[in-house]
Image (cartoon, rainbow, N blue to C red):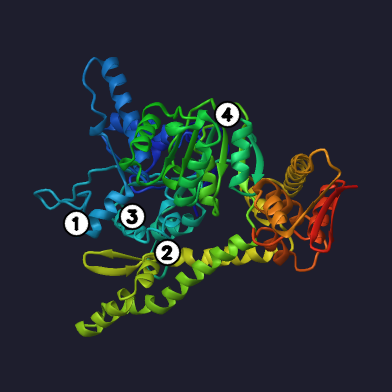
Amino acid sequence: MGEEQKNPVYLSDKIGLEYQRWNKDALVIIKAPTGCGKSHFVLNELLNYAMQQGRRILYLVNRTILKDQLIKKCNEKSSELSVRYRQIITIGDYIHICTYQEIEQRLKYGDTDPLRVNLKDANGNPIEPYYYVVYDECHYFYADADFNPGTEISYVYLTQSFRHVVQIFMSATIENMEEKIEKDLTYTGGFKLHLKPFKKYEMEIDYDYVDLHYIADNKEILELIKTEKNEKWLIFTDNIDKGNELAKDIRNIHEKYAGDNVVFIDARYKTDESGSDSVRELVDNRLIEKPVIITTSVLDNGVSFEDEGLRNIIIMADSKEEFIQMLGRKRPDGQRVQVYVCKRDKAYFSRKLHYIDTVKSCYDRYAGEIKSMWQSRNVLEQQNVLNTMFSNEATYRLLKRFCYFAVGYIKVGYFAELKIPKLQCFYRNMIKEFETDENAFLKVQAHWLGYSEERIQEFIEGETGQKLEDNRIKLEEELKKLLGENDTLAFSTEENKEKLKRNAAIKNLLKFFFDRTENIEDKEKRLEAIGKNDRAMQPEEFNCCMETAQLNYEMIKEGKSFIIKRK
């Protein structure tokens, strides 16, 4: 069993001087929240000690932007030490920083030892270039596996190559990797012969600085930003197309957000001048001056925003790893942070499940053949399998979710195999929960923040009550504008569609209140009909909305005319 320890605020205080007593083949697991100084511990305490002892550190990370930030910190440290000791101190002699993906690419193209760690001297003795190997954001191997199935190739190479040095695994979201790491690095063979103990440092997570809110859709994001024009926003999106669309919509809100004042950053940021400049600014200054930053998971790990002006974060994420990592980009600074999460609905998770079921069906069809095909010496049989898989573009796209290519072979990714059924299970559970609770996903996200059941209920009731009141006022204002000075308004079927359905503000408010109306038959089907512009708003649905909103309006139908009147 590992020695387990718990509590302080910063990791350096938690570990103290124990790092000086870590044996050469030690396994160290650090489960600590974002912002508690994990990289500070490595770049200061551990690096200083390594330099004194003439040892080297290999520091592994999962994002190029994080790598650039860490290299900049090392360069700053090198300059400080050179001034202090009046001689040139080269930090690079003691620490090497690289990404897991760099290693994976070289392995895939046939370089069996990209870090040159398996070399021997003239006498045949192994040359060990590193004393410490730090696996920062080590949840990467599991978390990225459903879109980068080749994560296992770097995991296997690294953990096997460095069995006899100090291996340090760090993450705020290590849960899905912890058991795998312990099993692979403390046991050997099928008999689980215990090899060595390990050190585990675990720190409590505290999100008391967060004020939690929720949004139903992107239209609410626009309303929020329009209302708070002097605020800065960091928005994490789970979809590139929606991110670009959101950026375009925000630019149209106000001249303050025109042009490059709203930046969208995804994995292709190096080819976009605004994105590239913003990333460089983040690396250099740990902040971006633009009032609105929209980004994908390219910024969800390790990167630090040390910006007192950034007080609002919007998170669109389905997994705990993504959620916690996204939230952690804003470093706590003693001030409150407004965090907005997506409510989501049953239909959203049904779409997610449909897609992952399709991936799993493809896996069930081909994974066995892929694993066994290379065992056959029959080249024709191998070619038949490959032809079947790659003759269809849709099949090829699905295969890329759980397969990777390396040195001319196609292989099934271990962590992708692990993650796909877990995603299926999660989506099915969410769909089931939504059948009886429209706030099911809000509760899950609040649980990720460590909220108690009582606090979750307070959060949902408080937010829902506030939204009901805000939207009641908005709907009343829209209806007043519609009726003008009149107490009644009569219009045709076509005018009904134009005034109530093609008016996005009124339509969305009516959907909001109808969705919250209880004891209605065929609710989902009728809610869908309200959202369609080619169908007139019917009196029964309209009056249900008025009752839920507690507004004194009603609709009746006389012949072919629809009439709205104040009560």
Q: Which of marks 1 and 4 is nearer the N terminus?
A: 1
Q: Tell me what residue is drawn at x 55 percent, y 66 percent.
A: 353
Type of amino acid under label 1 = Asp
Type of amino acid under label 4 = Glu
The reply to whether residue 193 is visible in this rendering is no
Rendered location of residue 565, percent (x, y): 86, 49
- Vertical order, 164 against 271 (above or below): below
Given residues 232 and 286, the one toward you in this image is: 232
Type of amino acid under label 3 = Thr
Residue 494, quarter of the rendered image: bottom right
Q: Earlier in the sequence, mark 2 or mark 4?
A: 4
What residue did someone put label 4 on? 231
Q: Which of marks 3 and 1 is nearer the N terminus?
A: 1
Type of amino acid under label 2 = Ala
Q: Which of marks 2 and 1 is in front?
A: 2
- Vertical order, 214 against 436 (above or below): above
What residue did someone put label 1 on? 111
Rendered location of residue 343, percent (x, y): 64, 51
Residue most extreme to the right:
567
Given residues 430 and 35, the one toward you in this image is: 430
Q: How crowded is mark 1: few (under 14 residues within 10 Å), some or many (20 or more)?
A: some
Q: Which of marks 3 and 4 is nearer the N terminus?
A: 3
Label 2 sits on a secondary structure element that is helix
